Image (cartoon, rainbow, N blue to C red):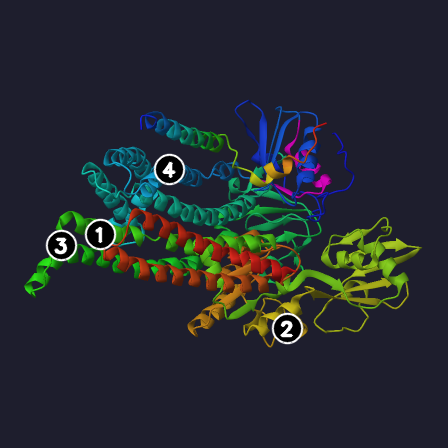
Amino acid sequence: MGIMIFLIPAAVLMGAIGLGAFFWSLRSGQYEDLDGAAHRILIDDE
Amino acid sequence: MGEPALSQTGCPSGLAPPTEGENRADPAAFVRTDKQGRESLELMVQGAKCAGCIKKIEGGLLAMPGVEDARLNLSTGRLSVAWAPGVLRAGEVTEALAKLGYAAAAFDPEAARQQTDEEGRKLLRYLAVAGFAAMNIMMFSVPVWSGHGEMGEGTRTLLHWVSAIIAIPASLYAAQPFFKSAWTALRARRANMDVPISLAVFLTIGISVSETLQQGEHAYFDGITMLLFFLLIGRYLDHRLRERARTAARDLLALQSVSASRIDANGHVSAIAAREIKVGDRLQLAAGDRAPVDGVIEEGVSELDCSMLTGETLPQAGRPGSAIYSGTINLTQRLVMRATARVQDSTVAELSRLIETGEQSRAKFVRLADKAAQLYVPVVHSLAALTFLGWLFGPALLRLFGVEAADVGLRIALMNAVAVLIITCPCALGLAVPAVQVVATGRLFKRGVLVKSGDALERLAQVDVVVFDKTGTLTLGKPRLTSLVDVHTLQAAAALARTSRHPLSRALVEAAGPGAAAKAVREIPGEGIEAEMDGVLARLGRRSFAAPQAQDVADGSAELWFARGDEAPTRFAFVDALRSDAAETIAALKKRGIGIELISGDRPLAVENAARAAGIGAWAGGAAPGDKVARLNTLRAQGKRPLMVGDGLNDAAALAAAHASASPGTALEASQAASDIVIQGAGLLPLVEAIDVAKAARKRALENLQFSALYNLIAAPMAAAGLLTPLIAALAMSGSSLVVTLNALRLQMEGRSWAS
């Protein structure tokens, strides 16, 4: 059962990293133009 | 100026036709200076649909010397351009866009600044926190459930404590929108759906913490966070629907803030925003410009298109001294007008006030979900209270009647009452209607129908009479040549017509096709045009001007006369042609048992002809805007639910007064703003699909509500009887939400088979 002392914080930490990543993407405006993001990948850079 | 690399104009994928014509309004008044000291401009671009469009627009603008930044948002159609100060006129940007085949209009910077959707971002953050908490707590709950009986009490309590540490802050944070809304409702002495939700959040956390303290078996931390997660999904979907409608309305308003050309005391012309116009300003109206405010003409003689105000298709004469109303288009010659009202006091603004009063009456409409909530809240609360009292005093009551029963205590009674509140929490109910409406509006959006709000969809489903406007709605709003004339005469007349902006001249040119324009043409405003052709005088215009001796033909259609030298004069007759699918649309609506009426401000004879051609029995001509509103009020008084379809300013008040309203994409901004749905494209048939989808959506929403009711009928008694465990609660909640969402998605599947 001692292993749980490590596993529980590890699990929560991983979840928190995911949450942090989502907040970052939200703040950096990645949800402002969803259609544009889908199409821009098709544009070749010269 | 750098020429674009692509020669073809408009969307390279052909998803949208290139928008014709020049971008007239001078955007100079909307330029502002950004943080880096550059001049920047926000534009609304029409017709941008694909990656090719992004490349063409951004590439084309960046190739212009001095342009430092150009970024197109494909979702909203907004383009922001920035350039080094002084190197560029703002007009050059819109001209370049016009050359590329995209119409663009400048935004009022103040309107543009309010664009960020703060509320939506907050909801997304709540949603993310609730989702994170629900998933992590589930990770600790599954071992508790599966280790049932084998897990030691200490381990279980440890897992409960870890869950509590995550769940308490997360749910207090994520449930804020519900707390706020419940608090507002309670202060107004009302109860809405958020009251039981907030109560359930507090009670569940409280009871779960007390259970954990007593090393009990059941804690509902997983249930409460999952509940919040599902509820927030519904909340977010609903918000997005409303936000899209709000944005659409705001875009239209921002576009309305057109610019004007003011002439100062020294005769200099400068571009200003329409809202800066003061009474007494002298304004210049070039041919093709729309009058921004009410005023009086001071210089120039021209013809005015008042169709947006009156529905009348024929142009009116405008000369010094005559009044000109905002919304009127100056057709042929340059005019100078003196403003007699500010923008907010002009006819257009008066009409928007009429729209507001109409919309207030519409606000009384009760949405389906709210109706369900009114029924639901008292039932659930009494059931929870009864459960509590039943478990607390039930055993004592039974003993009175001589039945053996032991007291269960406050703890069990409270636990079971809370279980009722959790299990009946309107998870499925909260998703039932928004999920359906999001799918339905998404499906219509792809077909070019913009639905402005969820309740617009609900109202559309109830429509039983459709009232059409004629000019620009049932018809194209553009005259078309109907006379059969020999090719030589037609070409000769067209040569003269090519030099004029008059709508009838343009229709004549369209019928004749490409060709050369006559030289040395004189235009006599209000009369016609004349020129020497092959040595003889040729005239095109009114009968009194071109052929005074000819017989008058009064058949209700617009006409032009053409005379050359001593030849017999030729008459060109024009009608405002019906949209190609108008008759088909009317027939389809009739087949669905919907009544049809036509009401127009145009001449009765023209209205009668259009009604005949479209197959409409009930029609009225010469109607003022007030008459249209009166007719709609009569219909509503008879218990009917009319759908008004119109496009002009004269329809705007009627659109707002109707039970539901629609306008074509060519309609004036004020009318689009007053409408529930806007139909893009040239046809009217999408209107029929919109009604069909609205009806199907109503059916799905009702099914979802029935399912939620059934679910509660089974689950609530179980909870009241004390049979509920956290595992069952988690399964029931996610299961019912899934069923409701899948049922909503069926609407999408039907759409596929319908389209093919």
Q: Residue at x 67, y 39 (%)?
A: B51
Quadrant of residue B5 within the rendered picture: top right
Mark found first going from the N terminus, 3 or 4: 4
Which quadrant of the rendered structure holds the C terminus of chain B?
bottom right
Q: Earlier in the sequence, mark 2 or mark 3?
A: 3
Residue B387, quarter of the rendered image? bottom left
Q: Are marks 2 and 3 in contact (CB under 8 Å)?
A: no
Q: Is residue A13 visible?
A: yes
Reply above or below: B624 against A39.
below
Mark 4–mark 2 distance (CA, rounded to whole Å): 67 Å
Query: Residue tagged by mark 4?
Result: B139
Query: Counting residues from the N terminus, which is met first, the one under dot 1 or under dot 2?
Result: 1
The residue indicated by pointer 3 is B392
In the rendered structure, the residue with mark 4 lies on which chain?
B
Q: Which residue is mark 2?
A: B611
Under circle 1, the secondary element is helix
Q: Which chain does the numbered disc 3 sit on? A: B
Q: What mark, if any, has residue B416 been given in the picture?
A: 1
Is residue B91 in the magenta section?
yes
Q: Amino acid at mark 3?
A: Leu
Say which amino acid is labelled 1: Asn
